[in-house]
Image: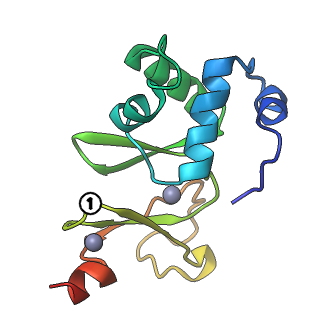
Amino acid sequence: MKNITNIPYYLKSNDIKPSFQRMKIFDYLYKNKNHPTVEMIYKELSGIIPTLSKTTIYNTLKLFVKKNIVIIVNIEDNETRYDADVSTHGHFKCIKCKEIYDFLFDTENLKIQNLKGFQKDKIDLYIKGICKECLFSG
Ligand SMILES: [Zn+2]
Ligand SMILES: [Zn+2]
């Protein structure tokens, strides 16, 4: 993913006013790369920012998604996760440890049937299974 050294500048260049809370939320997403839920971000940041509410986090993420600097990962129907890596990549969810792993794939050589001649603007690839570590630890 893109190397972002200056978060306030990055937010500003995407037409987002870099408030303290927005910077902290983006910083968390960018540094942790753990595809967190609103709940997870709240747990991590509410200690540092006592005034932070889940609604603020939700609204901030909604704005980030609208401005295309965050994507939604909807690998489970009942769980919305967020990702600051907006480059094309797939997500693997381990059903044992619940960890989400990023993976890369070759969009040119995907063997998609039936869509010859179609323009494909966005490809989401989700895989569920058991990660290597969980397989080895039994
Ligand atoms: Zn696992
Ligand atoms: Zn990802």
| Residue 54, picture quadrant | top left
Locate the C terminus and report the quarter of the image it occupies.
Answer: bottom left
What residue is rendered at 46% in x and 53% in y?
34
**12 sits left or right of 77 in the view:** right
Observer able to see residue 84: no
Q: Position of residue 111 (x, y in %)?
A: 47, 82
Residue that label 1 marks: 98
**34 sits left or right of 86 in the view:** left
Q: Residue furthest front?
A: 47
| Residue 21, picture quadrant | top right
Q: Position of residue 82 (x, y in %)?
A: 47, 43
User: What colour-coding does the image apply?
Assistant: rainbow
The kind of residue tagged 1 is Lys
Mark 1 sits near ligand 1, with its Cβ under 8 Å away: yes
Q: Where is residue 74 in the image (x, y as percent from the top left)?
A: 35, 47
Query: Where 44 sits versus 103, above or below?
Result: above
What residue is rendered at 61% in x and 50% in y?
31
Q: Position of residue 89 (x, y in %)?
A: 55, 65
Give SS at disc 1.
Answer: loop
